């Protein structure tokens, strides 16, 4: 299977992320995962890029799709979406300036907003990668995301298991902060409760599941 993103793609982002990280106090961009994508431990960096690769693979052919990247942060999928000739929107209520900065650095055209509840219209594909675990009022946000999905569209999510292996990996990687209010199982349960259907699931990495990436539809 052809890779969605290659080494040169990652290097473009790593360079930009390094420059941005060094412009602020240590830890400022931890919640946006910038230190994870650029981590000197190759296994840690690979894990975060593998999540992106898996999410894009599950999404399938998104050529010319209207796409919302919810919780876009540093926009690690912006370049890929542009290469697929997508009409791209991004939403991030905390790191919108980071998102805009990355658009300038990458020469990508993305409509950036800060409030998902102000978004109208519908999207063929919505990505919510490692963001829903941060949101206190998940039910309200998930219902809004469902409204934004086209009838035959899709929602691609990724999130941490928060199990023992996950927390051990964070400690070994040098991360001490904790920004999550729930795990991926809570998120999946919430999406099921509002009527979305899980159609595909991938786990990284069996037998030590750290992240789950899945595809959800209305049908």
Image: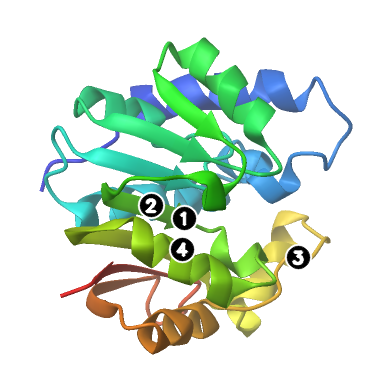
Q: Which mark is residue 144?
A: 4
The reply to whether dot 1 and dot 2 touch (C-beta < 8 Å) is: yes
Separation (CA) of disc 1 from disc 2 = 6 Å
Q: CA distance from mark 3 to mark 4?
A: 34 Å
Task: Judge by depth and name the residue closer to the eye, 199 or 151.
Answer: 151
Q: How much space separates mark 4 and mark 2, taking CA atoms? A: 14 Å
Query: Which label lies toward us, 4 or 1?
Result: 4
Height in image: 116 above or below 207? above
Alpha carbon of mark 3 to alpha carbon of mark 1: how far?
Answer: 22 Å
**Residue annotated with mark 3:** 171
Instruction: Give the label on residue 127, or none.
Output: 2
Can you say whether 92 is above or below 177 in the image?
Answer: above
Query: From the viewer's perspective, is the residue at label 3 or at label 1 nearer?
Result: 1
Quadrant location of residue 58? bottom left
Mark 4 element type: helix
Q: Sequence order check: which comes first, mark 3 or mark 1? A: 1
């Amino acid at each position: 299977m052809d890779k969605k993103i290659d080494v040169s793609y990652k290097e473009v982002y790593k360079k930009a992320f390094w420059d941005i990280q060094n412009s602020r106090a240590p830890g400022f961009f931890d919640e946006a995962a910038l230190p994870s994508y650029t981590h000197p431990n190759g296994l840690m960096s690979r894990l975060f890029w593998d999540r992106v690769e898996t999410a894009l693979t599950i999404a399938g052919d998104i050529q010319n799709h209207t796409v919302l990247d919810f919780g876009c942060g540093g926009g690690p999928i912006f370049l890929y979406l542009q290469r697929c000739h997508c009409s791209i929107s991004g939403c991030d209520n905390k790191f919108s300036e980071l998102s805009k900065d990355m658009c300038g650095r990458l020469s990508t055209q993305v409509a950036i907003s800060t409030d998902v509840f102000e978004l109208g219209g519908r999207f063929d594909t919505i990505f919510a990668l490692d963001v829903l675990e941060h949101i206190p009022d998940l039910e309200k946000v998930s219902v809004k995301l469902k409204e934004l999905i086209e009838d035959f569209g899709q929602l691609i999510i990724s999130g941490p298991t928060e199990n023992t292996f996950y927390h051990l990996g964070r400690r070994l990687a040098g991360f001490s902060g904790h920004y999550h209010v729930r795990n991926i199982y809570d998120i999946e349960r919430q999406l099921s409760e509002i009527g979305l259907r899980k159609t595909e699931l991938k786990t990284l990495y069996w037998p030590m599941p750290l992240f789950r990436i899945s595809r959800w539809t209305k049908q």
